[in-house]
Image (cartoon, grey):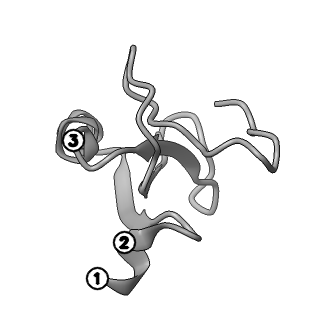
Amino acid sequence: MTTPSPDEAPICSARGCRAPARFQLRWQNPRLHPPERRKTWLACPEHRASLGDFLDARGFLREVVPLPGSPTLGS
C-alpha cells in the first residue's frame, strides 16, 4: 500500500478497485510478524466483507475500523 498525497483520497486495496476507502482492515500473519505488528488494507464498503473474509479465513484479521476522516465514523 502506498501512502496517498494529502490531496488524494485513499483508495480500496481490492484488486482493480478505485473506490474511496472507508475502512481499515488491520491484520497480522503470526508466522511472520511479532504480536504487536499490524499491517493495514483499506476497503470501500463494497469490498469490506470480501477482503475481511479473505484475511479471516487465514486467521490474519485482527480488527476492522473506520478510516479516520471517513463519513462512516458518524454511523
Vertical order, 15 against 40 (above or below): above
The furthest residue to the bottom: 74
Q: Amino acid at mark 1?
A: Ser
- In the image shown, does 8 or 53 lie closer to the viewer? 8
Q: Secondary structure at mark 1?
A: loop
Mark 1–mark 3 distance (CA, rounded to whole Å): 16 Å
Cα distance in 3D space between marks 2 and 3: 13 Å
Q: In this rendering, is residue 62 above or below 28? A: below
Q: Are marks 2 and 1 in contact (CB under 8 Å)?
A: yes
Give me the residue at 58% from left, 53% from top.
38
Q: Which residue is mark 2?
A: 72
| Spatial CA span between label 2 and label 1 | 5 Å
Q: Nearer the viewer, residue 33 or 71?
A: 71
Residue 4 sits in quarter = top right
**Can you identify the residue that label 1 sits on?**
75
Q: Viewer-proximal residue, 66 or 39?
A: 66
- Left or right, 73 with respect to 2, comes to left
Label 2 neighbourhood size at 10 Å, few (<14), some (14-19), many (20+)? few
Which residue corresponds to mark 3? 46
Q: Position of residue 41 (x, y in %)?
A: 49, 41
Residue furthest right in the image: 5
Across and down, in percent, residue 63 comes to 37, 64
Q: Position of residue 72 (x, y in %)?
A: 36, 71
Which structural element holds mark 2? helix
x%, y% of residue 58?
A: 25, 35
**Sequence order check, earlier mark of 2 and 3:** 3
Q: As shown in the figure, which amino acid type bears the numbered disc 2?
A: Thr
Query: Could you tell which of marks 1 and 3 lies nearer the N-terminus?
Result: 3
